[in-house]
Amino acid sequence: VQLQASGGGLVQPGGSLRLSCAASGFALDHSAIGWFRQAPGKERERVAAMHIRDGATYYADSVLGRFTISRESTKNTVALQMNRLKPEDTAVYYCAADRRGFLLRLWAGTGDYWGQGTLVTVSS
């Protein structure tokens, strides 16, 4: 079982990036998937999460209206579309999964599986 996060990079303020989280070893159909981030010197914080089957989503206030979490239907993959990026969005982004679909448990930071992280840097 593995989660592979990708898509990070350097972007200017106001720009966009799309992160992907590819799951292998289990099907996403009944899972909850979330994105978390950790900036240097700060604690990990939650960003967005969704229940794959019923589509319920949660977003942190700081990203609401700018970030969108979605499943890529042709793949066992979940994406995080990040628009209007700000310097304070700079962090290592991790994806996580709760295989039984317990979205609230995942949103609280308890996931069964975690990816290795991808670095997002927002700077001019």
Image (tube, rainbow, N blue to C red):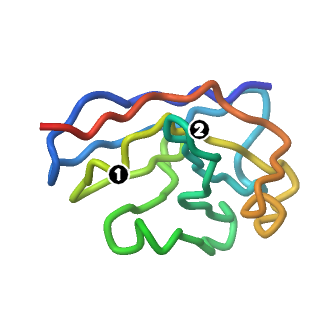
For the point 58% across and 71% down, the residue is 57
Q: Residue at label 2?
A: 94
Q: Is residue 37 left or right of residue 13?
A: right
User: Label 2 amino acid?
Assistant: Tyr
Q: In this view, does 3 lie to the left or right of 92?
A: right
- Sequence-wise first label, 2 or 1: 1
Whole-Å distance between the Cαs marked 2 and 1? 16 Å
Q: Give the image quarter of residue 86.
A: bottom left
Name the residue nearer the viewer: 120 or 34. Answer: 120
Q: Where is residue 56 in the image (x, y as percent from the top left)?
A: 63, 75
Q: What element carries label 2?
A: strand
Q: Is residue 11 left or right of residue 67?
A: left
Residue 79 higher or lower than 100, as above or below: above
Residue 58 higher or lower than 35, as above or below: below
Q: Residue at label 1?
A: 88
Q: Is residue 52 left or right of residue 61?
A: right
The quadrant of the picture occupied by the C terminus is: top left
